[in-house]
Image (tube, helix red, strand yellow):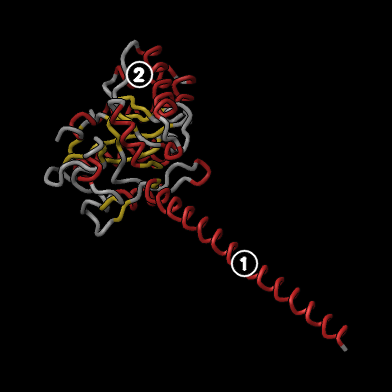
Amino acid sequence: MNLLNKFFGNFVVISLKKLVLGFVLLILCVAVTVGLCGKVIPDAITTAKMNVDWGLSHAENGSQPVGNRSQAELSKYDAYYLGSPDEKVMYLTFDAGYEAGYTPQILEVLKKHQVPAAFFLVGNYLDTKPELVKQMVAEGHIVANHTTHHPDMSKISNLENFKKELGDLEAKYYEITGQQMPKYYRPPQGKFSEENLKLAKQLGYKTVFWSLAYADWDQNQQPTHEEALKKLLPRTHNGAVILLHSTSKTNAEILDELLTKWKEMGYTFGTLDQLCNF
C-alpha cells in the first residue's frame, strides 16, 4: 500500500509540474504573439497611410472632384491636381510608356486647335522615339518626367534611388534636346507616398496628378467614341487637369471633336506653368 501511495504521489507531482510548465509556456507564447502583433500592426497601418493610390470622388457632373488628398494638403509639397474653380481653364496632359502610332495624329490636332499639352514620358519612349520628343518640344509642348522605368514609386523612400529614377530620364532628355527637362513629375499609376512628395519637392519637382480621366490605356479594350465622350464631357469642370493616354486609338480619333466641344463650352487651355502658379 505504501508503495502504491508513493507511486501515485509521484505521478501527481510530475503531472502538476507538467501542467505548470505547460501553463507557463502558454503564457510566454501569448506574450510573444501579442508583442509581435503590437509591433507589426502599427507598421502596417503606417504603411497603409503612407502609400496611396491617387483617387477621385465626383460629387456631381460639372463640379470639381475631391481627391483623396486635398489640394491644400498637396500644396505643401508643390503637388497639384486642380486649377482655379473660378476660371474656365483646363490643362491637357498625356501619359505614354511607349509609342503606339497615334502621337503624330494627336500632335496634328493640338496644332490645329493651338492647344498646349504636357506629355509625361518614360525612358523607353525617349529611347525609341527621340524624333517625336523633339517635335513635342518644337511645337511648344512640355515633356515631363514619368520616371525612367515606370516603377511603383511609393515603394522607393531612399533619396538616391528616387533621384536616379528621375535623373536618368533628365539625362536622356538633355541628350535629345540639349535642354534641361522641365521639373514636372507624375507618379506612375498614381501610386505615391508622402515621402515621395517630399523627395520630389527636395529635387525641385512639382508633382502633377489629375482631376479628369477615364479607362483609355488598354489597347485591347478601347472604348467606343460614344463611350469616351460620355465619360469625359459631363465631368468637365473648371481647372480640370485632364489625363489621357497617347497610346489610345480612341483618344487620337476623338481629340478633334473633344477639343471642339470643350471650346464650345467656353473653355481655354493653360500650361503646367500656369497651373502651378495660379
What is the x, y in percent for residue 262? 23, 43
Residue at horizontal 17%, vertical 39%? 89
Q: Where is residue 129 in the image (x, y as percent from the top left)?
A: 45, 20
Q: Residue 122 versus residue 198: which sits nearer the camera?
A: 198
Which secondary structure lies at badge 1?
helix
Q: For mark 1, what is the residue?
A: 24
Cα–Cα span, label 1 and label 2: 75 Å
Q: Which mark is residue 135?
A: 2
Q: Where is residue 170 in the image (x, y as percent from the top left)?
A: 38, 19
Place residue 13 in its image quadrant.
bottom right
Q: What's the amino acid at mark 2?
A: Gln
Q: Quadrant of residue 187?
A: top left
Determine the image quadrant of residue 257: top left
Q: Earlier in the sequence, mark 1 or mark 2?
A: 1
- Is 190 on the left or on the right of 39, as rendered? left
Identified at 18% across, 46% down, the residue is 238
Residue drawn at the location 16% of the way across and 32% of the way down: 277
